[in-house]
Amino acid sequence: MSETELRKFMAILIYMSVIKYPNVRLYWSNTVGFQPIKDIMTVNRFETIRRFLHFNNNEKHLPKEHPQHDRLHKIRPIISHLNEKFALVPMEQRLSIDEQMCATFVAHFMKQYLPNKPHKWGFKLYVMCSVKGYAHKFEIYTGQENERLPDEPDFGPVGNVVVRLARGVPRHINLIYFDNFYTSVPLVTYLAKQGIYSLGTVQSNRLVNCKLPDKKTMMKKSVPRGTYEEQMTEFDGIDVTAVTWKDNKVVTFLSSYVGAEPVGQVERFDKANKTRIKISCPHIIKEYNAHMGGVDLMDSFIGRYRIAMRSRKWYLRIFYHLLDMTVINSWLVYKDLKITEANSSVLNLCHYRLELAEVLAKVNNSFELCNKRGRPSTSNSVEMEIQAKKRRGPAQHIPPKDIRTDNVGHWPGNCVRSRCKMPGCKGYTQTRYEKCGVALCLTTTKNCFKNFHM
């Protein structure tokens, strides 16, 4: 299998995540098939690639008895490569760490059950995301204890996950948020010593010798909703703050950089009086709620257009999930770049996936995303005019810029007399170009073909 075929295979997977059919072979059906997929490769070739797709050499897989045995050996190169590439994007100041589920029906000993997730059964991932949902780093839960560096203390299997994910986080700049699955006083103080301040919900039994009221006391009817208590202490040379707050339930927070002040207000519905009331809300709660949802946001993006193809091979299900995660990350980077450009429209996730699939399926194998040397290209102005034409109303499909400018396979052919699709040209032509599928003028006086593809 060549690199070009692998790109086409991934293009089909991305198409299938948007265009849903009940059966894979229906995409190639003569009656209800999806033509862009049919044009990429045959169904037999697609299923052959899916059948024999591997990511590592099985002969190098160490036996279970070996101390260096890796349960993720079959998918390890993909995990390492993606973590390396995801880390190239500069981190935002505020990051969150949470669990993510790779949903699957495969029977496998690594499959986990998370009742609070939309997909309750699957492979569990630990992901560190920005507030916008960009995944900077992840690891997959295997039941094995991953390596610990010599200077890193042992916080248990869960606390060590946070330490590993935070290794590449810049010091004295970033803040990390996590939930009560990870939070403990030793972990929060260790991160603060490393220059990373943190905030998380915490289980009350992890706050030893803390004088905060217990849940039974806080949940009494005599204690009004919105009541909070705050305790501050110094642990191992680090100031930490614990705040417990009564809402529908009692929740406790632990932080190394923020406390209850300034106290704000939030609206809640009072069932007794059947009206909305305002209750006190410590600043630490608002800080947590505003910045903790990065992983959940990534989950929601993946859930919109998920590669739902089933497979008996567990590592393929993980590969599909990681491909979805990669597409979301690229879309978030694309949006950030587009926002900085003047007069540029931003594709939503659906259209971005469709355009990405089209580019992967058609772009030249030797195409490189870099600026060409020489005279300035007219492609930017042509692209702006094409996008402006799309905004004005329905128009014929125009291939993305990456396909128009790859300089491969744009062969001319005859067609019925059609309007030239070059923005600004009002002429007619009988020449249509194969790869782009558009009619363009090519005469002694006009060369719309050259301007369109530069």
Image: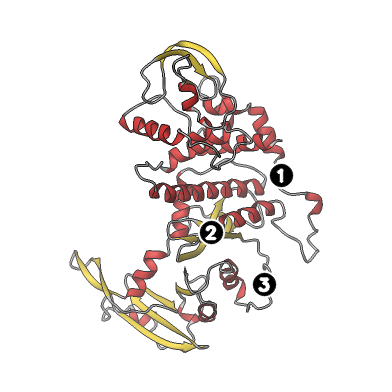
**Residue at image mark 3:** 148
Q: Nearer the viewer, residue 146 or 223?
A: 146
Inspect this view and state whether residue 206 appears. yes
Asked if residue 8 lies left or right of residue 232, the reply is right
Of the residues under marks 2 and 1, which one precedes in the sequence? 1
**Residue at image mark 2:** 136
Q: Of discs 3 and 2, which sits in the foreground?
A: 2
Q: Residues within 10 Å of mark 3 (few under 14, many from 20)?
A: few
**Residue at image mark 1:** 54
- The secondary element bearing badge 3 is classed as loop
CA distance separating discs 2 and 1: 25 Å
Q: Of discs 2 and 1, which sits in the foreground?
A: 2
Residue depicted at x 57% and y 48%? 321
Residue depicted at x 65% and y 57%? 110
Tell me: residue 85, above or below residue 255: above
Q: Nearer the viewer, residue 79 or 242?
A: 79
Of the residues under marks 3 and 1, which one precedes in the sequence? 1
Q: Quadrant of the N terminus?
A: top right
Q: How is the model colour-coded? A: secondary structure
Of the residues under marks 3 and 2, which one precedes in the sequence? 2
- x, y percentage for residue 319? 62, 47
Q: Residues within 10 Å of mark 1 (few under 14, many from 20)?
A: few
Asked if residue 439 lies left or right of residue 75, the reply is left
Residue depicted at x 43% and y 27%? 397
Outermost residue, front side: 375
| Type of amino acid at the residue the image marks with label 1 | His
CA distance separating discs 3 and 2: 20 Å
Q: Residues within 10 Å of mark 2 (few under 14, many from 20)?
A: many
